[in-house]
Amino acid sequence: MIYLKNIFKYFYIILTPVTSFSHPGDLVEYNFQNTLSISTLNIFLNSLGYNSTNIMYPISVYDIKYESIDHNGAVDTLSGLISFPHSNTDAFPILTYQHGTLVLDSQAPSITGLSVGNYEALFVGLGTTPAGFITVMPDYVGIGNPEKFHPYMIADPHTRSVVDILRATKELSLILEDTFQFNDQLFLIGYSDGGYSTLASQRGIENYYSHEFNITASFPMAGPYDLSGTMVDFFLSGPDYSEPFYVPYVLTSQLWYYQGLEVDFTDYFEPFWADTLPGLFDGTHSGDFINNLMPENPLDILLPEVLEDFENNENHFFRQKLTLNTLLDWVPQNPVHFFHGMGDEIAPYENTQIAYDTFVGQGAQNISMNLYPESYGGHGEVAAIALSDGFEAILGYQVILTKGDLNGDQLITLNDIEILSSGLLCEINLTPFQYWASDVDFTNNVSVFDLISLADRVQ
C-alpha cells in the first residue's frame, strides 16, 4: 500500500528542523490570505465591471517565503504570492506571472495579495486562477524586503526568483491541508519589466534547468529585451521620456549588483545624484516621487566624462553589463508569443521586432509576434489588451487532468491501469502526480482497490 500526502507531510516536518543548510526553493513559511467562492468571485468581478465566463473554480490565496542562493553564494529569502483553484479531482497547469516595474516594497504581490491595492495582481490573479491555473507571482529579488535592493533589468536574479518559487509552490502542494495538484504544464507571462523577466526566465530555464522544468509556452510582453542596442540608442537620442526614473534604476542596479554595495557613486554620477540616488531606491519612494526630481534628460545625472565614455566606448562598464543582460544570445526551444504596442513610448516595440527576427533567423520554431498599431495607445494603454489576448492564447494550450489519468493523455485507458499496476508491484517509481492520480477512491493511499476502481472507468 502506497501512502500519499501524509507521507510527504511527515517527512517534511521531520526533516526540516534537522537540516543545517538551505536549498534553493525550500519553503520557509506560508500564510493564508483568503478563499473566494465562485459566487463571491462573480460578485467581485461584476463590481469591477468585468463579466468573466472563465470562473470555473473557487480559489485560495497564500503568500510565501522561500530560500534562494544569491550571485555571491549567500542564502537569500524571497517572497511571492500563490493562488490556486479548488478541486479534489483535477490537476492544473502552473502559470507564473512576472509583474511590471515596482520600486515600492509595499506593492509586492505577497504584501498586497489579490486586492485593489495592486490592480495588476488582482487583474491577473482573478483572470487566471478561477479558470483552472495555479497562478504564481514572484515578488522578485529585493522587492518587499527593505533590507535588499532589487537588481532591475538583470537577467539571472529574475530566473532565480522564478525557478525557486516554482520549487516552493510544488513543496507547498504537498503539505497544505488546503490541497491543490499541479500537472506538467508550465506557462510564463509578464508585461514590461515582467516581459523582460519572462524572456529572461525562459532563457535561464532552458539553458540551466531544462531537466527540472519544461515550459509549455511563454508570453513576453512589451519588454526591453535588446538593452544594449534598442534601449541604448533610444536613450542616447534624447527622448522626452515619461518614466525617467527607469534610467537610474537600471544604472544603480548594475553598480550594486556587479561592484557591490560599497561602490562609490561619485565615480559615475554628478555630486547631487551620487548623494541622492542610494536613498531613492530603498523601497519607500514611488516612481512618481523620483520622476519629479529627475532632470529633463535622465542621462544628465551622469558625470559628463562618464556619459561621453558611455556614448563612445563599447567597453564601458554600463555597456558591458547591458550587453550581458540583453536576451538575444540563445535560441528558444519552446514556444514564444511576443506582444508589443507600436506606440510604446517606454520600451520601443523594436525590442520585440529584433528579438523575433533574431530568434527566427537562428532557426527557432514556434515564435509568434503580435504588434498592436499606434492607435491602441502607449505602454500603459496596451497592457490590459495584451494580457487579455495572451491569456486567451494560453487557454488554447491549457490541459486540466483528472484522477485516474496517470499518463496525462486526458483519457482513462488500459495504459493507465498498466502504470498503476507497475507502481503497486514496485516495478516503476510513480511520480508525485501519478501518486495523486492513482488515488481514485480518495483514501489518501494507493492500493489494489484503486486499481479496481480505475478498471471500471476504462474507456
Image (cartoon, helix red, strand yellow):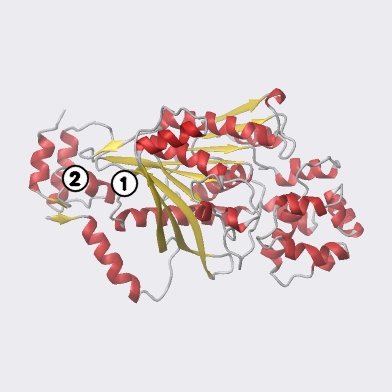
Circle 1 sits on which residue? 181
- Secondary element at image label 2: helix
Please say whether residue 209 is visible from this viewpoint: no
In terms of depth relative to the viewer, which is nearer, 144 or 392? 144
Residue for point 59% across, 45% down: 194
Among the 4 quarters of the image, the one containing residue 305 = bottom right
* x, y percent for residue 446: 14, 50
Residue for point 46% across, 55% down: 165
Residue for point 20% across, 33% down: 412
- Compared across the picture, whether 33 is left or right of 421 comes to right
Which amino acid type is marked by label 1? Gln
In terms of depth relative to the viewer, which is nearer, 45 or 288? 45
How many badges with numbers are in the image?
2
Q: Is residue 135 above or below residue 17?
A: above
* x, y percent for residue 454: 13, 38
Q: Is residue 324 above or below residue 41?
A: below
In terms of depth relative to the viewer, which is nearer, 292 or 327? 292
* Crowd rating for badge 1 (residues with CA inside 10 Å; few <14, some 14–19, many 20+): many
Which of the image's four quarters has the C terminus?
A: top left
Mark 2 and mark 1 lie on one chain; the one further toward the N terminus is 1
Q: Is residue 2 above or below residue 233?
A: below
* Crowd rating for badge 2 (residues with CA inside 10 Å; few <14, some 14–19, many 20+): many
- Secondary element at image label 1: loop
* x, y percent for residue 296: 87, 47
**Disc sitting over residue 438 in the figure:** 2
Please say whether residue 299 is visible from this viewpoint: yes
Among the 4 quarters of the image, the one containing residue 177 = bottom left
Which amino acid type is marked by label 2? Ser
* x, y percent for residue 5: 24, 56
Residue for point 33% across, 76% down: 18
- Compared across the picture, whether 437 is left or right of 138 comes to left
How much space separates mark 2 and mark 1, taking CA atoms? 13 Å
